[in-house]
Amino acid sequence: MTDITSVLSENRVFPPPAGFSERAHLKSRDDYDKLCAEERANPEAYWSRLATEELHWNQPFHQTLEWKPPHARWFIGGRCNLSYECLDANLDQHADKCALRFEGEPGDTRNLTYRELHAEVCRVANGLKALGVTAGDRVGIYLPMVPEAVIAMLACARIGAVHSVVFGGFSAQALQERMNDAGARVLLTADGGWRKGAVVPLLANVRAAMAAGIPSLKDVVVLRRVSPQPLELEKPEVDWHTWVKTQGPECPPFWVDSEHPLFILYTSGSTGKPKGVLHATAGFGLWTKLTSRWVFDLRDTDVYWCTADVGWVTGHSYVTYGPLMNGVTVVMYEGAPTTPAPDRFWDIIERHHVSIFYTAPTAIRSFMRLGEEHPMKHDLSSLRLLGSVGEPINPQAWIWYRDTIGRGRCPIVDTWWQTETGGILISPLPGLTPTKPGSATLPLPGIHPEVLDTHGKPVPPGAGGKLFITKPWPSMLRTIWGDDERFTQTYFSEQPGLYFTGDGARRDNDGYFWVVGRVDDVVNVAGHRLGTAEVESALVSHLNVAEAAVVGRPDELKGTALVAFVTLKQGVNASDALKAELAMHVSREIGAIARPDEIRFSQALPKTRSGKIMRRLLRDVADGKVTTQDTTTLEDLSVLAALRQEDE
Ligand code: PRX
């Protein structure tokens, strides 16, 4: 197997906007270099200083790190509590400041100050205790994007229970599988949530999952969100409001060991059963707090909106823990981006004066497709920083985001990280990093990524390879719940002792990282291993293309043929002439090697609920096979059926 050939070349550079740097927490390359040098000189002293400064220690740690690859333990002997960190620690200065600014899809709103959030969290924590939940017990959370989702997470953290959030869009089967794997004792849920004007039937799914069997589950607490009538509940369900009503608004935090598990979050592997990624308290807390401040440059006056659902890691690290530890106002929106109209997001930004906006490239591309008239209707002048996460952002979308949403004023932070990394590892620092569209730029101070070839040797600048993190960091996953062997196999067997991200990347002459996507998605064309993200990026840079996914299909002659699935912008007609033009366009942009052998137009692409294109399903479609893959995390099954029909 040769290494990855990178074909994308993007030369535009955008320095931090004038005026941004002076006010930023980290202002200059010098600030960055100093932190990096401090860590290099003495990593343990660096991490120990940060942990001491950032977290409140009920009992100080006596050792910074124990690293027995692949197992790390951080801040050993210390005791802390992240609910305390998010709430109590803010009561001195921010008690009456809005912590959560919620907007439901139907338009209902609710504001919770830090004091109110503290009281709500304590009530729920007391409610959990009343159900017999103790430290280390697992609590499932299957809720819409409502304040109770954040409250539930923090209530668990308050008493040392381990939360496991399951995305509200997942099916009964996916819920059952995850709850059984986690051995959850209690499940916090709702009757439903609002999405695209319809009800997501959460309670019906819970009942189906219970009927299929979750033996560990003793109690189910149900929040009334959508029903106009009081709920008719069945054993062992209890009504949320009745449950908390009798609980007091004070609950002392349970000081947990630094390494005490904070949460399990399931992430679907490319095949097989989902992996329960386990995160530990102190390291996760430290890194999400710090990175929120460094990367989003959080200030007291910020109104911060990350559009991720709490069902994803982004909703843990950068909706809940990171921003609340920094005492900012967090906007939470329940529903779909285009309900009731395509400008809902821009309307929210304008009405709530959002200053920091963090979303995913897939969302940005769908907004591009809808047309710029929707954001243009709104005053977005409150925005001062934009973020992107979840997949490589193609330069076309990056520029659109900058111009149409940021109106050319806001720096963009393209943040690379994973469920497993707990927090952002590679990202621009907005006050000091010149950005290049499509690059996550540089590692944060203390993080050591490397692009290595198949023999574990660093590749020269410009060459592609596999992305590793070569030293432990505080918010790294600790293991896969119940399967430490799989943890070692998945992340530490490619190069023993080094964390393998599963991503392909290259580093340019300035040391910037360019992630080309998952190595599973790399295709071998005539001896070149191409990251499909680059070919996709070339396709979407064509005026008529909204989205593209590229996969390999076995081909007798070439070994692998490139098949591109292309969604066109609204109003563009599909034609053979356009296919030929697109193939030419790719040749021109990145070279004949990447020219697709086949282009298929389709109305939509199969995506996970978090917006990632499911290329493994497309590989089956391209190859004419009936899929045997797990489709439970697919956003919309009809997309797959339509793709097959388009094929016929
Ligand atoms: O392939 C990378 C891509 O998303 C993967 C992690 O996905 P998940 O665990 O669902 O977490 C998403 C939220 C952090 C990575 O292995 N990815 C994420 N962010 C970027 C990215 N690829 C390129 N650039 C990014 N900024």
Image: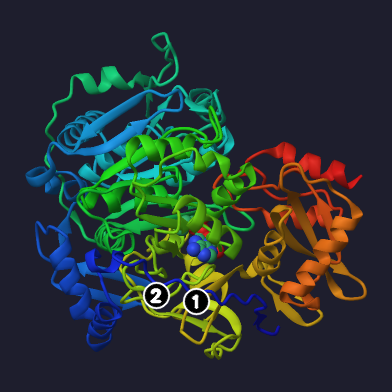
- Please state which of residues 197 and 555 is positioned toward the viewer in this rendering: 197
Res 619 → quadrant: bottom right
The structure residue drawn at horizontal position 72% and vertical position 44%, both measured from the top left corner, is: 604
Left or right, 432 with reference to 497: left
Left or right, 372 with reference to 417: right
Q: Amino acid type of disc 1?
A: Phe
Q: Residue furthest left?
A: 92
Going from the N terminus, do you reach mark 2 or mark 1 first? 2
Judging from the image, what secondary structure is the residue with disc 2 in?
A: loop
Camera sees residue 486: no
Q: Amino acid type of disc 2?
A: Pro
Query: Label 2 belongs to which residue?
Result: 443
Q: Are marks 2 and 1 in contact (CB under 8 Å)?
A: yes
Left or right, 245 with reference to 16: left
Query: Label 1 belongs to which residue?
Result: 513
In the rendered image, residue 48, in percent from the top left (x then y), is placed at 18, 73
Q: Which coloring applies here?
A: rainbow
Mark-to-mark CA distance, 2 and 1: 8 Å
Q: Residues within 10 Å of mark 2 (few under 14, many from 20)?
A: many
The structure residue drawn at horizontal position 22% and vertical position 85%, both measured from the top left corner, is: 42
